[in-house]
């Protein structure tokens, strides 16, 4: 199986699947990577905010960043070779690169919708509203 490394733009967490407005492509990609790992594939994600050393320690990534900058991310390496840039790969592409079996049905978790729950201790929906401090 090929080793897959994904170099991504700066995100708030390692997967980017958090917060109230999660892009569906990140949800789908994260589910595809979980599926790939479950089938024994070696996949590593590097977030520019959390793992900048990974970007400068890999020559193909460093060369890519010099030409395209972080706007060109994500960048995908397969066995150290640039396989894709500018978008997240599909499950089919990941399957082909990794050698994982392609016979599994695709299931993508739905994006959670933000909840409209009031904050405790206030009548107007926020703990910092109304002149109080947190």
Image: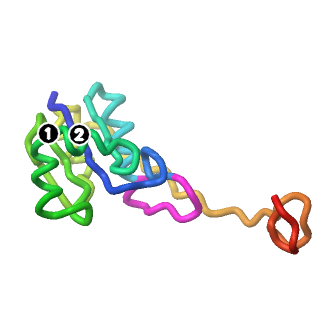
Asked whether 31 falls inside the magenta stretch, the response is no
For the residues marked 1 and 2, what is the alpha-carbon distance in whole angstroms?
6 Å
Using the image, determine if residue 130 lies above or below residue 95.
below
| N-term mark: 1 or 2 | 2
Q: Helix, strand, or loop for circle 1? A: strand
The residue that appears at 16% across and 64% down in the rendered structure is: 68
Q: Residues within 10 Å of mark 1 (few under 14, many from 20)?
A: some
Q: Which residues are magenta?
A: 18-27
Please give left or right for residue 102 compared with residue 27 in the image: left
Name the residue beneath numbered marker 1.
78
How far from the left and from the top, in percent, is residue 28? 39, 53
The residue that appears at 38% across and 37% down in the rendered structure is: 34
| Marker disc for residue 111 | none
The quadrant of the rendering that contains the N terminus is top left
Please give left or right for residue 93 compared with residue 123 in the image: left
How far from the left and from the top, in percent, is residue 13? 47, 48
How far from the left and from the top, in percent, is residue 95? 21, 40
Q: Main secondary structure of the magenta part?
A: loop
The residue that appears at 33% across and 56% down in the rendered structure is: 9
Asked whether 26 falls inside the magenta stretch, the response is yes
Q: Helix, strand, or loop for circle 2? A: strand
The quadrant of the rendering that contains the C terminus is bottom right
The residue that appears at 26% across and 48% down in the rendered structure is: 7
Name the residue beneath numbered marker 2.
5
> Mark 1–mark 2 contact, CB under 8 Å?
yes
């Amino acid at each position: 199986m090929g080793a897959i490394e994904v170099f991504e733009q700066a995100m708030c967490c390692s997967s980017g699947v958090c917060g109230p407005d999660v892009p569906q492509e990140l949800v789908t990609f994260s589910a595809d990577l979980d599926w790939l790992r479950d089938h024994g594939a070696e996949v590593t994600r590097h977030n520019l905010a959390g793992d900048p050393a990974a970007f400068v320690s890999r020559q193909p990534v460093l060369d890519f960043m010099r030409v395209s900058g972080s706007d060109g991310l994500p960048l995908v390496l397969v066995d150290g070779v640039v396989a894709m840039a500018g978008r997240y790969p599909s499950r089919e592409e990941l399957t082909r690169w990794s050698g994982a079996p392609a016979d599994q049905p695709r299931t993508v978790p739905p994006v959670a919708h933000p909840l409209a729950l009031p904050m405790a201790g206030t009548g107007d929906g926020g703990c910092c509203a109304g002149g109080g401090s947190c």
